[in-house]
Amino acid sequence: MASLFWGKRPYDIQGTDTIFLNKIKENMLFQYQNCMEYRNLIESKGWNEERIRDLKSIHEIPFIPTLYLKHHKMDSLPEKKMMTRATSSGTSGNKSDIGYDFTTLWRALGMSVSMGKYHKMWSLKPCRYVILGYERTSNGLGKRDAEEKAVAKTAYAFTYLAPAKSRIYALKLVNGEYVLNLKEIKESLIKYSKGKTPVRIMGFPFHAFWLLTQMKEEGIICHLPKGSVIAFGGGWKQYYTQQADKETMYQLIEEVLGIPRERCWEYFGAVEHPILYCTCKNNHFHVPIYSRVLIRDVDTFEPVANGTTGLVNLVTPMIRSAPVLSVMTDDLGILHDSSECGCGIKTPYLEILGRVGMEDIVTCAAGAEQLLKSAVMEEQK
Ligand SMILES: [Zn+2]
């Protein structure tokens, strides 16, 4: 049987419809048999296997709201089977805590390999990494919370997509404390722009925007060598604050660093739905074969047509160790037909508009602002 997670074509939705449906059914049965809470939920909805006839009926799968997961730990396997646990980047102290078993991680690896190949992220050419985030040291990480650790881990994993000639971090660990290191970052970028080695920059859009604006104001224009890349990752919410400024951001990157927009990679994922969504050359998040996205009416929860705004419901059979095959986020989004993009990828793409409750976004932005303010004060000293 063809493989869903280790397949070579991450956007071949039609070719994988059947296997996706089978995996969903298999996963649902597994959750039903192994997670009591999920079983109760399913039974309260009067579920039986016949309800899921084809892909059109996947909206009938009882979904779990991400808000619920922030208050309840839901596992479908005993703790000793979990290879790792991940927590979401909740800002209010309530975080989803999801355990991943070997099967789930193996599938995630297949997905990462396939997506990395498709988007040409893997390279054998050595490059220099500039991480606009926390440094990971040989003895682990400093005393930070789980969220920051997760971000640092992602950034560190990113530095393995191509051999590293060097790595520098915007937040450097000095005597157990993180210090902002923008002066060195700027000086290094200037130095790198005179060489031939490609540079890979990674960070939150918010941090990059701040750095590039500052560089432009200071008249620092340093076009990086051919093959350089800038990548934005992290949780969902990092996108909201920059959403309106996306165009400005691409222009700024091209102007200051000379990186064209098709070399600006963006990706997102969530611990409750760890599917990798990467932007196409037109900077759109097409839905890969590992998941299906449903948009639902905010009041009735009924699925709505493409092009209509609603709540984002994410469906994937990837996670075996938790009953998160269908999660309802509190994000508002629109699913667009692939023809609206024209990049050649044949699957619809998701546009995230923001969160239903604005509280989280405000808290997150305030957190980042706080950090940046203290950094500015530091520079002025
Ligand atoms: Zn596209």
Image (spheres, grey):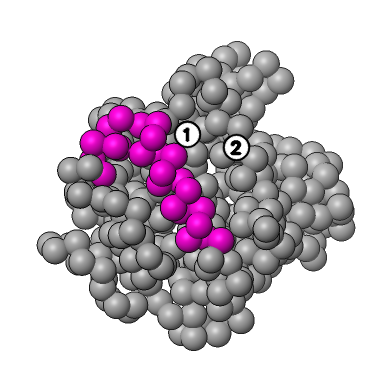
Image coords of residue 178 (percent x, y): 54, 24
**Relative to residue 89, is residue 215 depicted above or below?**
below
Q: Which residue is mark 2?
A: 103
Image coords of residue 325 (percent x, y): 40, 48
On the question of residue 122 being in view, the answer is yes
Kindly identify the residue that appears in the image at 29 percent across and 77 percent down: 305
- Per the rendering, the mark at residue 143 is none
Would residue 149 be found to the left or right of residue 236 on screen?
right
Would residue 296 be found to the left or right of residue 81 on screen?
left
**Relative to residue 340, is residue 321 depicted above or below?**
above
- Name the one closer to the observer, 258 or 167: 167
Amino acid type at image mark 1:
Ser
Image coords of residue 48 (percent x, y): 29, 51
- Name the one closer to the observer, 286 or 77: 77
The range drawn in magenta is: 19-42
**Relative to residue 336, is residue 79 depicted above or below?**
above
Amino acid type at image mark 2:
Thr
The disc, 1 or 2, on the residue closer to the chain's N-terminal end is: 2
